[in-house]
Amino acid sequence: MTKKLSSLHIKILLKVGLFFGLSFVFFCPSISAEQDSIKLPAITVTDFKEDKLLLSGKTRSVPFVLNEIPGLLMNSQGNSSVQSDLSIRGSSFSEAGLCIEGLALDNPQTEHFNTNLDLPGILFGQPEILYGLSQTRYAQEHLVGSVNLDFLQASELHYIDLAAGEKNMNRQDIFIQFPIKPLLSNEKINLGFFLGRDEEHAINVKDNNLDSIHGGIHIQSFSDSFQTDMLFSRQQKKFGARGYYGANPDWPAEEKLDDRLLLISCKKVNDEESFFRVTAAWKELSDDYYLYWSFPGLYKNHTKSTEYSFSMDGEKTFSNEFGVIWRVGADKEKIDSSGLGNHHRENLSILLLPEWQLGKFLFTIGTSGEWFSESSFTVLPKAGIDYSFSDSLSGYCSYTETIRQPSYTELNYDSPDSLGNKGLENQKARSFDLGIKGQTTTVFDYKIALFLRNSENTIDWIWQDSDSTRWVATNLGNVNIYGSEAGFNYYLSDIFTISSIYSFLKKEHNKEVYASRYSLDYPEHLLQFSITWNPFSFCELKVGQTLRWQKENPARSGSSFGADGRLALRFIPRKLSNNIVLTFLVENIWNHEFETLPGLPNADRRASATVTMKW
């Protein structure tokens, strides 16, 4: 089913949606909880316990926390403080993304900036990796998967971080969060401020340095029925970008980013049988990229991208056996660029996902609709069956379809090292999932899954032959992805935790390609685990390890085996003070030289120490 929807119509719908959404955000505390029962299947959100050791600023920042989650691969240019790409189940960076309270935070210029958020992770619960029907239920969809962050209930907390490490690495962070006088008798209001700066030298080559400053405000109102959060953040950073984005490492490069985010969210809480949520955001990014190549000597691209986005979701329950999950979303993207041109586009999405509970079976069948101002209306069916074998074992199978528009970099980029393609079409994915989830004891759970994905109009940056000098955005046509994964979590009280996942992946395609930079460059075997050990109440040891066997790629020099390890030791020097935490961090423990992205040298081993003072 296809139907052209005019840009004017989408603009009107976007404005109407934003008006009603923001109206709800500001006035929702007065809405009665006696409305019809609405719920959304709960995601398990793990709070970071404040009675344990407080994680220091960098190791608690959102990009670093994401790097610690088995099942999620972070491919960094430089390190997590500079720029990192998300990869879920072998996806390229453009096929996965980040959501806050179910709202996708995208960037029309390039998805390289989807995780450009140096926010305190202490504002959020444990990040959730979503794909298949779980992504459909809980958040706006990216092509393959999303990482969703939900705000925690705020509490009074203050800390200062002072960090120093090898090669002039230094970082300072301050976080202050305290209650203020409520407007209504049943409200709790917390006001938070955060500010920090980060400096690192010679991250992966001698002139790839980083200098950044970030800060923001968080206000949370919490009542018996609703939680409302408002977040404003800004981040400015300058970094050496030699070899980034596929550029020749012989050419010096530099990039400057200025990122602003305003996000407002309101959700219903403290009611297992009812859920409603609305989130709206304004995001603006200014990007200046300089490449000093041999002729004519300087390439410069200035781009300013702006996104207005909105999402409202919940579930209408008609009986104990039947309900409908629903979502309405809209966004407007605008880009003004010296290299990509001036463009704008709009999008409107609607989801209806009925669910029937029949005995031990849960049947799900529905659809979402996507209206794009620059292309046709698309219907994306969803279906699934969940079966409960017992209280400790369940199985599921699902089918979902998703879609994405090419970024303006993929469409219009023209630099000495990369060339876009204006003929690229919307990329579409059809995903099949089959798996089981079990819990043998109260301290051990596991999952096993098989998945098949067919990607249509697959976009990748490739070298067509060995004589290629520029990466070209190319439509690979259909790519079939076959995969399996098995993982477990083991919890021994608050003393010992281990999480691990192994995945196998295979991609098949008919396009003749000499070398791939993203989509066809993937780990065929991936083993990740994270261990946390608290031998004493004043001491914690955390180890993260990623082992990967990458697909052979002529653009990658050196081994196709990668071993990225991280170690953090934290303890409270009680003889000195109970309000001080010392953290010793080692990144790239084994000093492995594997190129996370082909042709880009890896950051070497680096040690640092942090003093965290709480009050």
Image: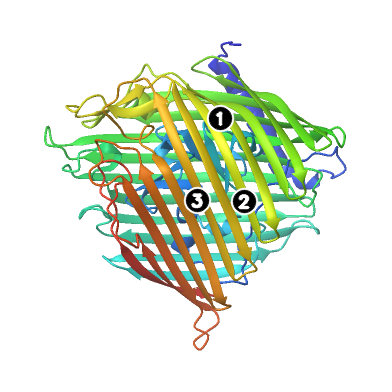
Q: Earlier in the sequence, mark 1 or mark 3?
A: 3
| Element at label 1 | strand
Look at label 2 and name its amino acid: Tyr
Above or below — where is 140 with respect to 372? below
Residue beneath the point at 59% across and 39% down: 103
| Residue 241 image point, x, y percent | 27, 46
Q: Quadrant of the N terminus?
A: top right
Q: Where is mark 1, residue-wise? A: 331
Which mark, by number, is residue 233? Answer: 3
Look at label 3 and name its amino acid: Ser
Task: Say which of marks 2 and 3 sits in front.
Answer: 2
Residue beneath the point at 65% across and 26% down: 382
Q: Nearer the viewer, residue 545 or 577?
A: 545
Which mark, by number, is residue 446? Answer: 2
Separation of marks 2 and 3 at Cα, in angstroms: 37 Å
Q: Earlier in the sequence, mark 2 or mark 1?
A: 1
